[in-house]
Amino acid sequence: HISADTPRMLLGDAQRLQQVLLNIVNNAVKFTEQGQVLLEVWSEEVAEGGQLPAPPATKTAALLAPDKACKLMFSVRDTGIGISSTDLGKLFSSFTQVDTSPTRRYGGSGLGLAISKKLCEAMAGTMWVESPGLGK
């Protein structure tokens, strides 16, 4: 779902943003056997007088609408298996899997979310996770 007041044209790094969104949506789908995955998009205007960080040399900083600076916000919610509070801190570590047992059901290298978090930070953003707990 894209909020109606979200600008349709923005200046930013579309390729990196696409990589981040693919990683987090793919994870949500991978860990959701039944139910739903919901991606929401909205923008928040930067307060008058407030400034976005200066773009780095690679031009990957914050997204700009043609007439104003804004932050583009994303939320991915799912009805998947959840994650325990003790494992939340592991999600953004490179080469780390929450389930390290030899019989784990879900594959992956443990790099997707770590890379996504670094890409968000390179674009002057943040990334975090919230979960009600494993199996909830």
Image (tube, rainbow, N blue to C red):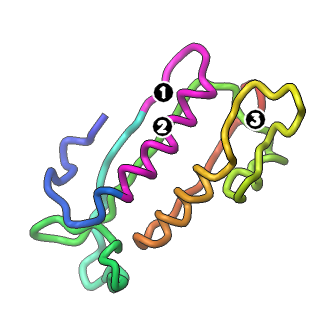
Residue at the spot 70% in from the left edge and 36% down from the top edge: 132
Tell which circle, 2 or 1, labels the residue nearer the N-terminal end.
Answer: 2
Q: Is residue 13 left or right of residue 122?
A: left
Find residue 19 and report its horizontal and vertical position in percent. Answer: 42, 51
**Residue type highlighted by circle 1:** Val
Q: Quadrant of residue 52?
A: bottom left
Callout 2–callout 1 Cβ contact below 8 Å = yes
Tell which circle, 2 or 3, labels the residue nearer the N-terminal end.
Answer: 2
Instruction: Identify the element where label 3 is drawn.
Output: loop
Tell which circle, 1 or 3, labels the residue nearer the N-terminal end.
Answer: 1
Find residue 120 and report its horizontal and vertical position in percent. Answer: 47, 63
**Residue type highlighted by circle 2:** Val
Mark 1, residue position:
37
57 lies above or below 39: below
Residue at the spot 28% in from the left edge and 57% down from the top edge: 14
For disc 2, the neighbor class at 10 Å (few under 14, some 14 to 19, many from 20) is: some
Instruction: Identify the element where label 1 is drawn.
Output: strand
Q: Which mark is drawn over residue 25?
A: 2
Mark 3, residue position:
133
Range of magenta residues: 16-38
Q: Quadrant of residue 102?
A: top right
Q: Quadrant of the C terminus?
A: top right
How far is the residue under mark 2 from the one under mark 3?
19 Å
Q: Judge by depth and name the residue closer to the eye, 128 or 55.
A: 55
Instruction: Identify the element where label 2 is drawn.
Output: helix
Find residue 110 and report its horizontal and vertical position in percent. Answer: 69, 48
For disc 3, the neighbor class at 10 Å (few under 14, some 14 to 19, many from 20) is: some
